[in-house]
Image (spheres, rainbow, N blue to C red):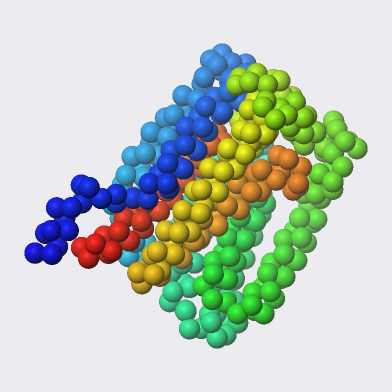
Amino acid sequence: MRSYSATRQLPSLRLYDKWFVIAVVSIILFGLLMMASASIVISDKQMEQPFFYLYKQAVYLGIGFFLGGAVLQIEMQYWEKYGSLLLLAGILMLMLVFVPGIGHRVNGSARWIGYGSLTFQVSELVKLIVVLYMAGYLIRRHDEIRSRFSGFLKPMMILIIISFLLLLEPDFGATVVVMTTALGMMFLAGMQLRHFIVLLSLAASSLAVLAVSAPYRLARLTSFLNPWERPFDTGYQLTQSLIAFGRGGWFGLGLGKSIQKMFYLPEAHTDFLFAVIVEELGILGAFTIIALFLLLTTRMFMIGREAQRLGKHFAGLAAYGFALWVAIQFTVSIGVNSGILPTKGLTLPLMSYGGSSLLVNCMMIAIMLRINYENRMTSLGIK
């Protein structure tokens, strides 16, 4: 009788976090608007259609909506159960990018698999898979993780393999996101502080060695410190981005009035979308974007905390992992655009142009909605 009564009350109850949904919808719509503005010139030049990239992104969003709807039906227990199989599939796909005829190379990087124009960037899916696998592992090995350092060495070996494959592509940005997200999840799972410091130091040292081992990575690291020293060579992207920041001021030049997107700023609709936002909408527009991402990640952490309070520890850690992933990626993307961090290829989640990223982000959002839904069902005593 209690279950029937609770069920009858469902229409008047919110089964999903209102502020989380508002943040997601706002970021997506804002992203479509600014991506269309940033890509209009290059789209007209390359495709003779000013809104080609907008239409394509809208198609990806439509596919992502239906994909997310399917993912939303999957209970969290199945992600926990099949996390190891997903990890093996992810590693296999990372290997397939190097297979001729299956893998696709663009601008010297082998990051895509597919056929013809239908390609998919594997590293984006691997980010999601690593979060789900790590959440399951940290629950299964909870006691070992809290008491022994060996509990963290085992997943680190897997992460090293994944990082090695990502660096072969090469995709240093994805490597940083995957490693830092996994380390953050380990810390939140209860790893002893001294063990965490040792592991963090080893990971940071390894990434530093890898960063300086390749000439192009070293050039990026050194050029961001003084991009004006070589403004037409290694510092070109950053100087053009900083010019966009300077033009924008507090209130911007106005929507659609960016000058830097007119072939001055490379990747204006992908990696350097934030610079165009600042140029057209000013510092106030930038603060709006930052506020929306802060709202999104805060609600994700709150959903994860609620899941843990209800005893859904896998779902809680997965939510923490997704929140860390989004927070790290948007922080690095903004840091790169503003010259605070070295230049690397990381997009603004849910905003920058890119089909693979958008589809995986839609899956991640759907899983977060599922976690939130199961939390509320448990609170109602229905499930």
**Residue 369 % position (x, y):** 36, 51
**Residue 6 % position (x, y):** 17, 58
Looking at the picture, does residue 319 appear above or below residue 253? below
Q: Residue at x 31, y 55 (%)?
A: 373
Looking at the picture, tell me which residue is in the foreground, 48 or 106: 48
Q: Residue at x 55, y 49 (%)?
A: 294
Residue 290 located left or right of residue 207:
left
Q: Residue at x 22, y 47 (%)?
A: 12
Image quarter for residue 85?
A: bottom left
Regarding residue 84, the answer to whether it shows in the image is: no
Point out the residue furthest to the right here. 229
The quarter in which the C terminus is drawn is bottom left
Point out the residue furthest to the left here. 1
Q: Residue at x 76, y 46 (%)?
A: 340
Point out the residue furthest to the top here. 48
Looking at the picture, does residue 157 appear above or below residue 350? below
Regarding residue 225, the answer to whether it shows in the image is: yes
**Residue 36 % position (x, y):** 54, 24
Looking at the picture, tell me which residue is in the foreground, 104 or 137: 137
Looking at the picture, does residue 294 appear above or below residue 232? below
The quarter in which the N terminus is drawn is bottom left
Residue 201 located left or right of residue 116:
right
Residue 372 located left or right of residue 91:
left
**Residue 227 % position (x, y):** 84, 39
Looking at the picture, tell me which residue is in the foreground, 204 or 277: 277
